[in-house]
Amino acid sequence: MRALEPPRPHGLAATTRALAAAAAALLVVTGCGAPDDGGDGDQVRVGLVAEPASLDFTSNDGAAIPQAMLSNVYEGLVELDEEGEVRPLLAEDYERSEDGRTYTFRLREGVRFSDGAEFTAEDAVFSIERVKEEWTIGLADRMDVVQEATATDAHTLEVRLEHPSNGWLYAMASRIGAMFSRTGVDDLATDPVGTGPYTLDTWERGDRLTLQRNPDYWGEAPQVPTVVFRYFQDPGAMNRTMLAGGLDAIPNLQEPEELGGFTPDGGFRVAEGTTHGEVVLAMNNDEPPLDDVRVRRAVRHAIDREALLETAWGGHGTLIGSMVPPLDPWYEDLTGVHPYDPDRARGLVEEAGAGGETLRLRVPNLPYAVNSAQVVQSEVEKTGMDVEIESLEFPARWLEEVHGAGDYDMSIIAHVEPRDLHLFADPDYYFHYGGEEFASLLEEADRGSPEEQVAKTREAARVLSEDAAADWLFLMPNLTVAREGLAGLPRDQVGEAFTAKTLRWEEEG
Amino acid sequence: MRPVRPRRAPRRAVPPRRTGAASLAAGGVLVGAVVATALLSLVWTPHPPEAVDTGAALLPPGGEHPLGTDRFGRDVLSRIMAGARVTLQAGVSAVVIAAAVGVPLGIAAAMAPTWLSRLVLRANDLVLAFPALLLCIMLSAVYGGSTLTAMAAIGVATVPLFARLARAAALPVLASEYTAAARAAGRGRVAVAVRHVLPNIADVLIVQASVAFAIAILAEAALSYLGLGTQPPTPSWGRMLQEAQGLLSSAPLLSLWPGLAVAVAVLGFNLVGDGLRDLLDAGGAREG
């Protein structure tokens, strides 16, 4: 029976273990950075947070997928230039008919998919129809306006719309317009096939995604042969890996307070641009008490957004008052619609009889959201309502429960898609807003002349703000950090994609 | 997890070392300090630990805020004090869950027929096969992050430790003459387990509990650090570490305080466990 006696650790061993435990606690504090895995001119290592859950953006939401795939592996007929304007890409040029309902694209010849198949107008028809028939993400509704797409010859595509639409061509520059091979859509989640300057080399889940230069690319070959996207759950670890030399670029720094650590003396270049990333305090417009516009307005009046920006994001970013960033032509400063006014907020809550209600603030466990949530909680609780914070794992759990099932009262997330005002028009989308005046304004804007589009969209953004369909806490800045010598990182983030083909190492000199 | 192995024979031959009392005293002081802080925070903290004041963010230590303020202008000292409460709560609940499930399971396994005993042990191995932290992450992901799920998860993950230990310790007791006598006198199984086995294995279990407590504190800190444990704005040391991490280069002291607190508490409980074991060992040696 002796053999089964309980183990009794030797005293010294246990003390060592105690010290090890203490050391472990301190390791958490110092957050050991990852080791340097060496940098050279043959590759660019890009640090990102929020890894894609799959590589298939036709059936998975989440901005990380087009960020890595679009314009690198996949290309569209058109793309956005640095200013955010539409320009031809796989189409050599395009024409819009007098009535605005027919677009004729003349496609480039000699373009091949990475599986060897030639890109023809048939593939374009296939890709467009596939959005309507097979795509399951919310944004797929941008293709609903297409009545018919036909290949008039191998390199001419004609698209007939139900009605004139300004938004459609713009959407074609996003993931919606990505061109797929008719023979390459069997395994989109892991094996993307596109015409882009890069192809997928390896994807090590939880760590990195490696792109290799496409030797058969139709256009000018990118200068950098290998691009590695390294994904970090923890932005702090990402920053320290950058400082330790394990990364060459961070296109969007996630801990703005750390910006000061990247000095020119240390061999870093930093820049601050802007994005389409509206940090939205979403409110469930369907559920009491937030179905009452007075309560929603109270929430907006309660929050000191300037202090929030300072606290949550180190003061970097822009205050906006609606779902429109200054990058868009219809931007208007709406920050004064519901200014910070705690007394007014308290009065509105009282008037609506919402005092004592508990609001569930269910946020993704991302730094900007958790930081903002604690300020929002403290401010909104001063109106007489209670706020309960729950931080949910992002992306899977938050997407499923809040974004998908709408099980929340308030949430905080950055909506990074360009020109995504229309999300509010869908009453089934998790905001559950769908104001009729707003929806009809957007529709008129889409069908009207370019001048009408600007005027009507501006009006719609104002209606949205006055209805307090949500609160817009701030607009994400684009804080880029690059190693000295790396050029070609865009200053502003105008689209969904992180475009790697413009990256280049400058000659030492 | 330490493998079950025979006790090294020479251990009995050397005279019992007298380090037990010193470890116990040192550990007692550290643990006492943590407990006292937690109790004090129930009635008094210098500032409300959750009160946001964006105007007073990131103040350096000194004056009204002895340890400074965090990004939200909350008093760090008050949060460390209130955090001690969450930490102790997590530790106590985890150990209670683990012991309450694990010990009866272990004793039952020792007394049961071989096949049942094997079944229990294999089930134990199954739980053990998952690293404790992974199990915690899994449970927290399914049931949502809160102090409660973190405690339950840590507790469940620690059950096998107690079950194996209790079974191993109970076997020699069950083989002893006095239990045989009790059985012969007509005592039921449950009575034997409660009256004879449990008191005789209590010393081992207490030592295990103090070590498990230290592990639970670290696990709670780790889970909260990952955003799967205590929810904001409730202060827990792990959460405070997580929040401070983003400010590591601009306000490094913010990471130091909760890190030190975790180290002190873990060290304290480990020392208490060490000391207790040495003392109880020495007692056993004298009796033998």
Image: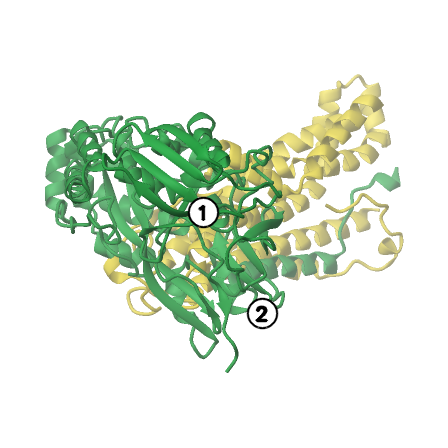
Chain colours: A green, B yellow
In the image, A224 versus A349, the foreground residue is: A224
* Label 2: how many Cα within 10 Å (few below 14, some 14–19, many 20+): some
- Residue A194 appears in which quarter of the rendering? top right
In the picture shown, does residue A460 fall above or below A33?
A: above
Q: Name the residue under label 1.
A: A90
Residue B141 place in picture, x, y as percent: 52, 36
Report the chain holding disc 1. Answer: A
The amino acid sitting under disc 1 is: Leu
Q: In this view, does A349 lie to the left or right of A126?
A: left
Q: Residue at x 84, y 39 (%)?
A: A4
In the image, A159 versus B123, the foreground residue is: A159
Mark 2 and mark 1 on one chain: yes
The secondary structure type at the circle numbered 2 is loop
Can residue B123 be seen in the rendering of this structure?
yes
Q: In this view, does B92 lie to the left or right of A427?
A: right
Residue B185 place in picture, x, y as percent: 81, 19
Report the chain holding disc 2. Answer: A
In the image, B104 versus B184, the foreground residue is: B104
Q: Name the residue under label 2.
A: A41
Residue A212 place in picture, x, y as percent: 60, 55
The amino acid sitting under disc 2 is: Gly
Residue B199 place in picture, x, y as percent: 70, 35
User: Quadrant where the N terminus of chain B lies?
Assistant: top right
In the image, B157 versus A212, the foreground residue is: A212
Q: In this view, does A8 lie to the left or right of A159?
A: right
Can residue B227 be seen in the rendering of this structure?
no
The secondary structure type at the circle numbered 1 is loop
**Numbered disc in front, either 2 or 1:** 1
Q: Which of marks 2 and 1 is nearer the N terminus?
A: 2
Q: In 3D space, how far apart are the residues under numbered discs 2 and 1 (Cα atoms)?
A: 29 Å
Q: Which mark is residue A51?
A: none
